[in-house]
Amino acid sequence: MPDDKKNLGHHGETAAAFFLKSKGFTILETNYRTKPAEIDIIARDDDTICFIEVKTRGSLKKGLPKESVTVSKQKKILLGACFYLKQKKWENSRIRFDVVEVYKKQDGFDINLIKNAFQAH
């Protein structure tokens, strides 16, 4: 991955975490890695554990950020979420899968939170 794209993604994830905190979320983990998946942000929203995929774009040439969260990517996030919940012994927790779209602008970011962006199948 080119450094510019990697830097944009890192800055987008940082902006997303600040945004989520401003909305009352408690960040539990960032860049949580398991063998099958990486989850960008794991957070608590009231009594719900949220597994959050952050997608950052500098332009919309390749479509909306949420469109890149494919079924294959969703399955990986689900596997990572199951591993996390088992590791923490939180298997009976209320969970949700969100996507945060981050759009780079000259003076910062526009951020869009999509709650319940996809469901566990």
Image (spheres, rainbow, N blue to C red):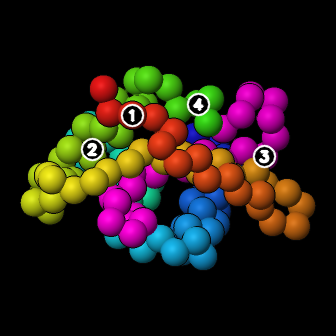
Picture disc at residue 68: 4
Q: Position of residue 46 (x, y in %)?
A: 39, 69
Q: Is residue 28 magenta?
A: no
Where does label 3 land, which residue?
58
| Residue occupying the point 45% across, 34% down | 118
Q: Are marks 4 and 3 in contact (CB under 8 Å)?
A: no
Q: Alpha-carbon distance for marks 3 and 2?
A: 27 Å
Q: In terms of secondary structure, where does tag 3 sit?
A: loop
First reached walking from the N terminus: tag 4 or tag 2? 4
Q: Position of residue 10 (x, y in %)?
A: 58, 59
Dividing the image into 4 quarters, which one contains the C terminus?
top left
Q: Are marks 3 and 1 in contact (CB under 8 Å)?
A: no
Compared with 98, 72 (above or below) is above
| Camera-nearest label, 3 or 2 | 2
Dividing the image into 4 quarters, which one contains the N terminus?
top right
Q: Which span is picked out in magenta?
A: 43-65
- Front residue (pair 54, 96): 96
Where does label 1 land, which residue?
119
Picture disc at residue 80: 2
The kind of residue tagged 1 is Gln
Badge 1: residue crowd in 10 Å (few <14, some 14–19, many ≥20): few
6 relative to 73 in the view: left or right = right
Q: Are marks 3 and 2 in contact (CB under 8 Å)?
A: no
Q: Alpha-carbon distance for marks 3 and 1?
A: 27 Å
First reached walking from the N terminus: tag 4 or tag 3? 3
Q: Are marks 1 and 2 in contact (CB under 8 Å)?
A: no
| Camera-nearest label, 1 or 2 | 1
Q: Alpha-carbon distance for marks 4 and 2?
A: 18 Å
